[in-house]
Image (cartoon, grey):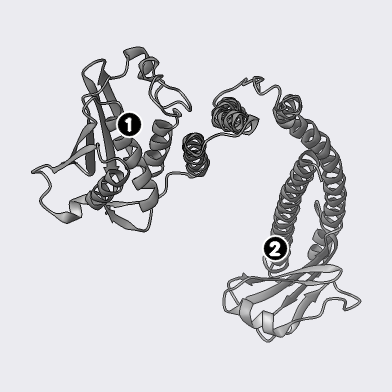
Amino acid sequence: MQIRTRLTLQFLLIGGIIMIIASAAIYFSTATFRNNDFYNALRIKAQNAAKLMFNAYDIDGHRVLNLEKDYGPGLQNVRIMILDFKDEIVYSSDENNEIKINYNIIEQVRLGKQAEYKQPPFEVSVTLYYNNYDRYVVIAAAVDTDGSLHLKKLKTILIVVWLISLIMFFIVGWFFSGRALKPINDVIKKVENISITSLNLRVPVIHEKDEIGRLAKTFNNMLERLEASFGTQKIFISNASHELRTPLTSINGQLEVLMMKDRSSEEYKESLASILDDIRSLIDLSNRLLLIARTSTQSPVKQEKKIRIDEILWQVQEDTKKHNNNFNISISLDQSLTDSDQMLVDGDESLLKVAVSNLIDNACKYSADNSVEIILRQSGKMIEIVFKDRGIGIPEEDLKKVFDPFYRSSNALTYRGSGIGLQLVNQIIKIHNGEIRLTSEVGVGTEVVVLLPVAG
C-alpha cells in the first residue's frame, strides 16, 4: 500500500472517530438536557395541580382536571395521582390505571427525596407536596412525544453529517497527503536519474529546516561521499595498476633477455637476484595494498585488547634491524611517563606494528645517516609518539598531499618506494581513534607526531 493511501485512510479513520465522539457527545448531552427540561416541567405541573387541589377549603378535582387539559409545551397524555399519608389515592386522572404505583419509590420520596423513572411510554415524576394539614405524594406522568421526535431527527442529522464528513475527510486527506508527499516524490524522481556515471548530480533542497530538506541534505552528503569514494577508488586502481605493472614488466623483460641465449652461471645468478628483488617488491606492494583495503573498510571502534605501545616500538626496532643493519633507531621515554598504564592503548597489535614500521622505515630511508629518534611521552589523555629524522625533508607544497594514495614528494622520486606507506599509516591511526601530525623542512628533516588515546 502506498504511503499516500495509508495516510489518507489514517486521516479518514481519525476524522471518523472524532466525528463519532463529537456526535455522541451532542446527542447524549441534548438527550440529557431535554430529559431534565421534561422532568422539570412535569414536576411543576404536579406542584401546580396539588396547589389547586388543596388551596380551597375542600378538595376540588374539577379544577385539577381543567389544569391537566392545559398540558403545556412538550407534555402529552398527562396523568396525575395524589396520595395521602396512608397511601390512599385522593385524586387520580388515570382512569385506565396505566400508571403503576411503586411504593418503594414513594417511601423514598416521603423521606425528602425526588424520584423519576420510566414506565414506557410514560415518563413518571414523584414529588412531595406540603400543606397546613398534611403531606401528600404527587405522581405526574406524561409522554415525551416531542422530545423523542426531536432526538430521532437529531440522530438522523448526525448520521448524515458523519457520512458527509467521511467523504470530505477522504478528499481532504488525499489532497493534503499528496501535497505533503510531493517533495518526497520530487526527490525520488531526481534520485532515479542519478547513477554511477552521474554522481555529480544533487537533490534540490527547498526548505532546509523541515524533514524533507534534511533528508535531501543527508542524501546529498551521501552522494558527495560516494563521489569522493569512487574518485579515490578510480585513482587507486589506476595507480595500483601502474605500480604492479612496473615490477611485472621488469621481471618479464629480464626473463626474456635470459632466454635469448645461454649464459654463465654468474650471469644467471645476477639476473635471478634482480628478478627476486622485483618479486619481493611486488609482494611488499601487494601486502600494502591488502592492508589499505582492510583498514579502509574499518570504522573507528574501541578495541578490546590493551597493548603497551613501548613494547610495539621495541619489537619493531628489533625486526627492522634484522633486515637493515645500517638503520639507527633511538627510542627514549619522557619523564612524564611514570606508570606503565600510561603506555597502554586499545588496538590491533599487528596494524600498529605496520604503522610504526612504516614510519621508522621512511625516517631512516630518507636520512643521510639512516637514523631516527623516537620519543614516547604523555599528552593529557593521549600517548604521544614522536618520530624525528634529519633527512631530505618534504617541500611545503607537498605536505598536504603526502597522505594521498601513491603520492610521492617531488624530491623523493629517486628513492625506492610506492607512495602508499603514509596513507596506510594514516588509516591505521584513524581506526584507532588517533591523530597524526607532520611537520617538515627541506634539507633539515621531518617530524611525525602520532597521538593515540590511553586505554581507559
The image position of residue 357, as x and y in percent, is: 33, 41
Residue at the right extreme, as displayed: 96
Which residue is located at x 47 percent, y 44 percent?
A: 299
Q: Nearer the viewer, residue 221 or 133?
A: 221
Residue 20 circle label: none
**Do we see residue 376 in this rendering?**
no
- Rendered view: 415 above or below 284: above
| Lower sequence index among marks 1 and 2 | 2
Q: Nearer the viewer, residue 167 or 203?
A: 203
> How many numbered discs?
2
Q: Nearer the viewer, residue 297 or 158?
A: 297
Disc 1 to disc 2: CB gap under 8 Å:
no
Quadrant occupied by the C terminus: bottom left
- Report the side of 445 relative to 154 (left or right): left
Q: Nearer the viewer, mark 1 or mark 2?
A: 1
Q: Secondary structure at mark 1?
A: helix
Amino acid type indicated by mark 1:
Asn
Q: Nearer the viewer, residue 338 or 80?
A: 338
Residue at the bottom extreme, as displayed: 86
The image position of residue 422, as x and y in percent, is: 39, 31
- Report the side of 394 relative to 178 (left or right): left
The image position of residue 275, as x and y in percent, is: 52, 36
Q: Residues within 10 Å of mark 2 (few under 14, many from 20)?
A: many
For label 2, the residue is 43
For label 1, the residue is 362
Q: Secondary structure at mark 2?
A: helix
Which residue is located at x 71 percent, y 30 percent?
A: 184
Amino acid type indicated by mark 2:
Arg
- Report the side of 27 relative to 128 (left or right): right
Q: CA distance from mark 1 to mark 2?
A: 109 Å
